[in-house]
Image (cartoon, rainbow, N blue to C red):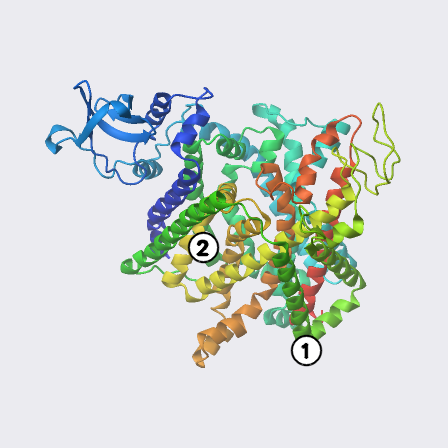
């Protein structure tokens, strides 16, 4: 184990370098230093000298990766000469940094010749004197520098802002862990009773509400209406408690649903083991079995998420800090991204990387303490470089693909911005519908699935939930099939548009109203609108229906990217271990160390704003959690007797993975699929608030909720936009979650007779 710990420590260096490389590429590929300088300088049209002076002051005047700068001598018409580093030739101007470091601009028409300065007449700069080298050097020496935005020492910013973040996240984490574990154990103990069903329904209700809605509703109810706590703000010392009560409560409330459901699933999976049956046969009490045996053997999936969260408490909570005005590191990250403060972003990412490495090491150590069968052995030193080389090559390839995508996108934009023909969407929707029907038909032929469907059919509430989900899917299909009546039509109309045919009004109107909403000169409406109209007079019911297609596409397609990728990577890492495990760990460590918001913003800039692009971006940034979970469970399962017996009998590796390991992690896959679908549907609300949601003009519940935030504070209040979008989202997530839980129990043969 000591060798493994030392190896993990040695891996810190390549991980930090790779994270620095990815962060550097993501930021400077999309926000060049010149753009940063223009954004930070107060003048609307700063001079070239001002820009280069700013770059020199903040250390961005060096080459990005390799310094190949050689001084050039310019000769002018008047016979004068200037020596310096040629920076840029912009049209009729030549920008040069002279040998004494002074920036200057010359007219190109006055230059009659140029030649390189002889090597012996200047002090050459080393090839490694580049921005990336100083970036990595600062990461290892903790020389974080100063903020590009304010000029303040970043170390001072970190020491000041970490305490408000800890004041919020630490009590929220402790309370959440206590309540989640206590409720999960009690619910598992009462499995099959009304307590279990009531708790399950309560969890589904809680987790069907997006975090942003909790925040908006909590501020409106407890701060604006009841006036129990301040709506936002901060104070030092004990005075901060009144500002922390509401965000801590909201953090606890929003975490109960998903965590309790997940812990309950893990505990129920362990209750179905043979040793529990043996203990019951010997007459042991259920309480003793649950707390002494089941809880201990269920800790690995729980520790995977809980232990890793401890170091990250310092980094704060992005949404809560931003909404409640808490000056923590989460709010600092959002402000730094919006202000293009790369120095602060770099420092926060590096600190997060070190914390993540510590969290991974603590998690692996906790595995060995809980389950002595799990042993980690160090890889020989020669093989240590193999995962580093593979991970580096993978990141380089991704960077090259990203650069190619940017170039291709620019060329396509220059040629013509052609929208995809509508008939292609019709063909895709038709093929997906046929594929789904064929999949259901194939499942009905297998006894395993027929038995599962029969058990689901006995739960009438689950059947009703399935009917609601299918209704949503039907509406999404109707909103995806479109055609033009005339060739000259601007855009095709979908089947749903033709069915509803909404009329546009002048401004707000309440649901089922006859006239405009409280206008001085209120006009009569052209028709009654079931859910009213918004500020532009658009029918709210029609917008809600348009949001269904966006939600279903985001939930289904993003999840189909996440789950297969995470399952393959997790099982492979946990079963083969060695350099395979090291490579996969290195990859997801690098990916998880970079803030999701930074990755999403970068990917959306590369790919462009759109629904398919958003699905892909969410998919490739959301697989790490499930991968780590599957890896942890596989590490435990591979040491069990039936896996070792199968290997001893000569069963092939693929057969062991497919027939023995995959079915025993299926409970985690099913519950994660349900949780991921719900989370991705609700994440669109947060992404719309952050400004990286779907493209403008695309119907979405997130855009409606984000746009309705200010309407709740106006007088008179406009409530129907918010409640309509939230109600539609809540109903879909609620039904999908409940049906997913019932289906999960029906698919598990060990839980069928209990």
Q: Count the marks.
A: 2
Mark 2 or 1: the one toward you:
1
Q: Which mark is residue 489?
A: none
Please report whichever mark, 2 or 1, sits nearer to the chain's N-terminal start. 2
Q: Is residue 535 above or below residue 667?
A: above
| Residue 515 location, quadrant | top right
Q: Secondary structure at mark 2?
A: helix
In the foreground, 558 or 31:
31
The picture quadrant where one finds residue 122 is top left
The tag on residue 445 is 1
> Residue farthest to the top?
78
Residue at image mark 2:
364
Q: Name the residue furthest left.
A: 120
Say left or right for 75 vs 246: left
Q: Residue 140: x and y, percent?
A: 33, 39
- The x and y percentages for residue 711 are 73, 31
Q: Residues within 10 Å of mark 1 (few under 14, many from 20)?
A: few
The image position of residue 607, as x and y in percent, is 50, 47
Q: Quadrant of the N terminus?
A: bottom left
Which residue lies at the image location 35% right of the left edge and 57% below the top edge? 390
- The quarter in which the C terminus is drawn is bottom right
Q: Residue at x 45, y 55 (%)?
A: 364
């Amino acid at each position: 184990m000591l060798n493994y710990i030392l190896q993990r420590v040695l891996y810190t260096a390549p991980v930090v370098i790779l994270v620095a490389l990815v962060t550097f590429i993501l930021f400077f590929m999309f926000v060049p230093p010149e753009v940063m300088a223009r954004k930070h300088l107060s003048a609307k049209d700063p001079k070239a000298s001002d820009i280069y002076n700013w770059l020199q002051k903040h250390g961005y005047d060096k080459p990005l990766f390799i310094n190949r700068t050689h001084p050039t001598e310019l000769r002018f018409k008047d016979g004068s000469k200037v020596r310096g580093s040629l920076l840029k030739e912009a049209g009729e101007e030549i920008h040069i940094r002279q040998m004494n470091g002074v920036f200057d601009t010359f007219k190109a028409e006055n230059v009659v010749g140029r030649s390189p300065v002889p090597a012996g007449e200047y002090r050459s700069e080393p090839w490694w004197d580049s921005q990336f080298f100083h970036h990595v050097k600062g990461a290892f020496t903790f020389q974080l520098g100063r903020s590009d935005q304010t000029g303040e020492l970043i170390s001072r910013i970190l020491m000041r802002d970490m305490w408000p973040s800890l004041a919020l996240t630490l009590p929220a984490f402790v309370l959440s862990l206590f309540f989640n574990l206590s409720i999960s154990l009690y619910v598992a103990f009462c499995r099959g009773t009304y307590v279990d069903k009531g708790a399950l329904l309560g969890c589904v209700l809680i987790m069907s509400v997006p975090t942003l809605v909790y925040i908006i509703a909590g501020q409106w109810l407890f701060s604006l209406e009841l006036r129990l706590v301040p709506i936002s703000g901060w104070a030092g010392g004990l005075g901060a408690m009144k500002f922390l009560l509401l965000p801590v409560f909201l953090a606890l409330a929003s975490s109960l649903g998903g965590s309790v459901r997940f812990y309950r699933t893990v505990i129920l999976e362990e209750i179905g083991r043979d040793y529990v049956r043996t203990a019951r046969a010997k007459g042991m009490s259920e309480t003793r079995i649950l707390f002494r045996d089941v809880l201990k053997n269920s800790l690995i999936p729980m520790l995977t998420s809980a232990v890793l969260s401890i170091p990250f408490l310092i980094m704060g909570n992005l949404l809560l800090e931003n909404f409640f005005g808490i000056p923590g590191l989460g709010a600092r990250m959002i402000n730094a991204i919006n202000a293009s403060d790369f120095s602060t972003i770099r420092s926060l990412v590096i600190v997060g990387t070190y914390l993540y490495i510590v969290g991974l090491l603590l998690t692996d150590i906790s595995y060995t303490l809980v389950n002595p069968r799990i042993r980690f052995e160090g890889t020989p030193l020669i093989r240590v470089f193999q995962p580093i080389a593979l991970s580096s090559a993978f990141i380089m390839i991704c960077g090259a693909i990203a650069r190619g995508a940017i170039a291709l996108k620019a060329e396509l934009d220059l040629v013509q911005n052609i929208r995809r023909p509508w008939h292609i969407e019709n063909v895709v929707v038709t093929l997906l519908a046929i594929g789904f029907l064929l999949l259901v038909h194939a499942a009905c032929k297998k006894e395993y699935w027929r038995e599962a469907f029969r058990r689901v059919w006995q739960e009438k509430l689950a059947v009703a939930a399935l009917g609601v989900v299918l209704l949503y899917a039907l509406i999404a299909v109707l909103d995806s099939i479109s055609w033009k009546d005339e060739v000259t039509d601007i855009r095709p109309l979908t089947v749903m548009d033709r069915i509803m045919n909404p009329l546009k009004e002048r401004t707000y109107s309440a649901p089922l109203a006859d006239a405009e909403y409280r206008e001085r000169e209120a006009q009569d409406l052209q028709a009654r609108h079931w859910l009213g109209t918004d500020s532009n007079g658009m029918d709210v019911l029609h917008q809600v229906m348009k949001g269904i297609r966006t939600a279903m596409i985001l939930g289904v397609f993003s999840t189909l990217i996440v789950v297969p990728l995470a399952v393959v990577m997790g099982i492979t890492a946990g079963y083969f271990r060695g350099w395979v495990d090291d490579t996969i760990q290195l990859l997801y460590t690098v990916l998880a160390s970079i803030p999701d918001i930074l990755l999403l913003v970068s990917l959306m800039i590369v790919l462009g704003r759109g629904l398919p692009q958003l699905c892909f971006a969410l998919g490739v940034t959301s697989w790490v959690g499930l991968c780590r979970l599957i890896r942890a469970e596989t590490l435990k399962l591979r040491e069990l007797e039936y896996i070792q017996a199968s290997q001893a009998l000569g069963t092939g590796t693929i057969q062991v993975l497919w027939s023995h390991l995959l079915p025993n992690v299926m409970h985690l896959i099913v519950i994660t699929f349900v949780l991921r679908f719900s989370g991705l549907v609700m994440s669109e609300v947060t992404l719309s608030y952050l400004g990286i949601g779907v493209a403008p003009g695309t119907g979405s519940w997130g855009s409606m909720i984000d746009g309705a935030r200010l309407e709740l504070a106006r007088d008179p209040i406009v409530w129907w936009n918010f409640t309509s979008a939230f109600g539609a989202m809540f109903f879909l997530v609620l039904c999908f979650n409940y049906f997913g839980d019932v289906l999960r129990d029906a698919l598990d043969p060990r839980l069928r007779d209990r």
